[in-house]
Image: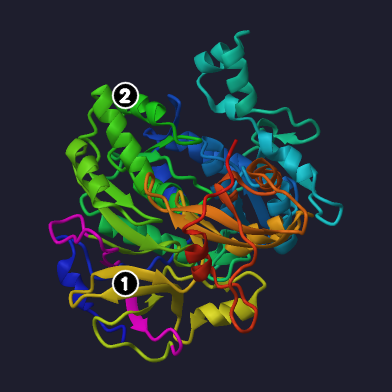
């Protein structure tokens, strides 16, 4: 398939959506600077009611950039961010980019072990971290050389009245305070970093093709790899999102930042596209349905992008509390299959269509979506975004396209497709084909109009709660347990919440008795909560191929008739 325009599926776009975008010629620094110049008096972030204007945001970015420069950060250096959704996250993101340095995003709930692997790979020497995660950074061995940790106290971004209330000697308030912030002696405070003057306006800016972000993903093989995303990649995806949400107005939209911004979907939706649209970005460090609905009473959302379980929970609770969500016009679901029942429930309480999309970290991340129009097709992941092309090929021979309507592996090409994996030429060569085509690892069927349906995965990742879990990573943790001889980790459908549940089939060492509590405690010390298996099945042996490889598909059949270890 060539990349000649117009794409055949473009006739199904919402009226006004172009078949292609105008490629950006400037970096993401220009994106935020334009928003600061044009929307200086408008609210940029809203954090539990505390508002920051675009002018103030721009000033903080410039001060943080100068503070980082004084710490020795230079163009091309990696700076690690270990932050939840908060105003400081957006400031830190753009401050690093302003210097021409590279943002490396991390889940602040990652274990010390998980962080070690990533730091060994990217080698960042300066970290901006939620203070509650600093302890894990200090647990790293001596060979992980971190020169400076900047500690962010979330409480200091709260409104004054809230901060004062949390100081009251009430056990529940004390627990909340302790959960949000932990003392980090010896670390440089965020406030100290911002005490620097503004960065010299003449300081060189990055070029559009420079590396902007390293975003870690399990990709198609399990071990986390750093996807290299350029300014052009991320800016292009923001422009593609702007084209897709035709009708969204500058300085009028209210984005609810529920998805984590350390994840590729949240990063693009809020930190690039949201800032591009000069929107009010309402930030939530974690999803709490009542907290979201309380905020909706004051500033109702117009852009509400999430995963199916969040849509379901929000719609149900809004009905129970009698809170209107008619403001929500632009709603995209991703990361897992979107049930028809969830679509019906959400659209009964909201003011717009809920459409399903598709993306992957290596594509910045969005590349397909259903139109915000009657042409949408529920049950599909939609059609390619503007300036995006797709092919469907034989999984064994990606140079050969399959016949129309036949299943095959989805390939993607567009300006949002990444440069490759950080320090991993072999995986880059296996994932990026000649001509810039990205192998997605997903098996799809495409109808004559270009609407695409995922039918299987080449990769064996488990998608739970919108996050990818690599079975091999969980298996390595369990195999380190002295009582475990062999293990296979698979995903089972989660009928209640959608997506999958992580479960493990375990072969114990002879004469060893294991309990659910033993295995779960072992995993919780070494893995993020979403990676910890929800159930454990004891088996005598695992099904393997002739070469000795565990057949995970057969493991699912093996454990189907079994009862898991009791949880109590």
Numbered range of the magenta stretch: 371-397
For label 1, count other residues whose C-alpha is less than 10 Å away and answer few (under 14), some (14-19) or many (20+).
many
Residue 477 falls in which quadrant of the image?
A: bottom right
Residue 83 colored in magenta in the image: no
Q: Which residue appears farthest toward the top when viewing the image?
A: 169
- The reply to whether residue 38 is in sight is no
Asked whether, in this view, residue 225 is left or right of residue 45, the answer is: right
Horizontally, is 192 left or right of 389 in the view? right
x, y (%) of residue 301? Answer: 30, 36
* SS of the residue under disc 2: helix
Q: Which residue is nearer to you in this view: 441 or 95?
A: 441
In percent of width and height, residue 371 lies at 21, 59
User: Does the magenta-highlighted stretch encompass residue 372?
Assistant: yes
Mark 1 or mark 2, which has the lower sequence index?
2
Residue extending farthest front: 511
Q: Which residue corresponds to the image point at 38% horizontal and 26% vertical from the top-left?
A: 290
- Whole-Å distance between the Cαs marked 1 and 2? 37 Å
Report which residue position mark 1 lands on. 387
Which quadrant does the C terminus fall into?
top right
Q: How far across and how far down the image is residue 181, in percent?
A: 64, 28
Rendering quarter of residue 206? bottom right
Where does the N terminus fall, quadrant-wise?
bottom left
Q: Which mark is residue 184?
A: none
Q: Nearer the viewer, residue 506 or 170?
A: 506
Residue 241, above or below 460: above
Pointers 1 and 2 in contact (C-beta within 8 Å): no
- Left or right of 143: which side holds 313? left
Look at mark 2 in the image and give the residue it sits on: 298
Give the SS element for disc 1: loop
| Magenta segment, prevailing SS (helix, strand or loop) | loop
Could you tell me which residue is drawn at 41 percent across and 50 percent down? Answer: 494
* Residue for point 20% across, 71% down: 10
């Amino acid at each position: 398939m060539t990349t000649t325009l117009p794409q055949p599926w473009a006739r199904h776009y919402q009226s006004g959506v172009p078949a292609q975008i105008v490629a950006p010629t400037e970096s993401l620094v220009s994106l935020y600077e334009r928003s600061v110049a044009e929307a200086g008096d408008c609210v940029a972030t809203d954090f539990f009611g505390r508002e920051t204007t675009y002018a103030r945001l721009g000033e903080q970015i410039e001060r943080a950039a100068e503070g980082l420069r004084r710490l020795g950060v230079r163009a091309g250096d990696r700076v690690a961010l270990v932050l939840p959704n908060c105003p400081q996250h957006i400031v830190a993101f753009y401050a690093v980019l302003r210097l021409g340095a590279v943002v490396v995003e991390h889940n602040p709930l990652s274990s010390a072990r998980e962080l070690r692997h990533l730091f060994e790979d990217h080698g960042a020497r300066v970290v901006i971290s939620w203070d509650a995660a600093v302890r894990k950074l200090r647990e790293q061995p001596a060979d992980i050389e971190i020169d400076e940790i900047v500690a962010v106290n979330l409480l200091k971004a709260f409104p004054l009245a809230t901060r004062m209330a949390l100081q009251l000697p009430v056990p529940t308030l004390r627990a909340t305070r302790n959960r949000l912030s932990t003392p980090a002696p010896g670390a440089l405070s965020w406030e100290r970093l911002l005490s620097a003057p503004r960065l010299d306006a003449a300081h060189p800016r990055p070029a559009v093709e420079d590396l902007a972000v390293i975003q870690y993903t399990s990709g198609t093989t399990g071990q986390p790899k750093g996807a290299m995303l350029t300014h052009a990649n991320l800016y292009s995806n923001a422009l593609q999102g702007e084209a897709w949400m035709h009708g969204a107005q500058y300085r009028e939209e209210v984005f609810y930042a529920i998805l984590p911004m350390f994840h590729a979907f949240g990063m693009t939706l809020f930190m690039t596209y949201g800032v591009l649209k000069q929107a009010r970005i309402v930030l939530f460090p974690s999803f709490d349905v009542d907290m979201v609905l309380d905020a909706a009473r004051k500033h109702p959302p117009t852009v509400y992008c999430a995963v199916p379980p969040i849509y379901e929970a929000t719609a149900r609770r809004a009905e129970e509390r009698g809170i209107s969500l008619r403001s929500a016009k632009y709603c995209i679901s991703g990361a897992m299959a979107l049930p028809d029942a969830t679509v019906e429930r959400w659209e009964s309480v909201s003011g717009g269509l809920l459409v399903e999309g598709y993306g992957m970290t290596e594509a910045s991340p969005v590349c397909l979506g259903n139109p915000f129009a009657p042409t949408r097709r529920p049950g599909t992941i939609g059609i390619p975004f503007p300036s995006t092309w797709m092919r469907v090929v034989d999984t064994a021979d990606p140079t050969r396209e399959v016949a129309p309507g036949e299943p095959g592996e989805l390939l993607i090409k567009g300006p949002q497709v990444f440069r490759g994996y950080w320090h991993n030429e072999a995986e880059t060569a296996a994932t990026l084909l000649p001509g810039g085509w990205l192998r997605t690892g997903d098996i799809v069927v495409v109808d004559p109009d270009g609407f695409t349906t995922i039918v299987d995965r080449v990769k064996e990742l488990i998608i739970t709660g919108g996050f990818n879990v690599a079975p091999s990573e969980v298996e390595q943790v369990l195999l380190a347990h002295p009582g475990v001889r062999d293990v296979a980790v698979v995903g089972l459908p989660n009928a209640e919440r959608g997506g999958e549940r992580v479960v493990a089939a375990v072969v114990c060492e002879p004469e060893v008795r294991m309990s659910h509590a033993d295995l779960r405690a072992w995993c919780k010390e070494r893995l993020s909560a979403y990676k910890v298996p929800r159930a454990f099945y004891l088996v005598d042996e695992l099904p393997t191929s002739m070469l000795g490889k565990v057949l995970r598909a057969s493991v699912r059949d093996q454990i189907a008739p079994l009862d898991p270890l009791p949880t109590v």
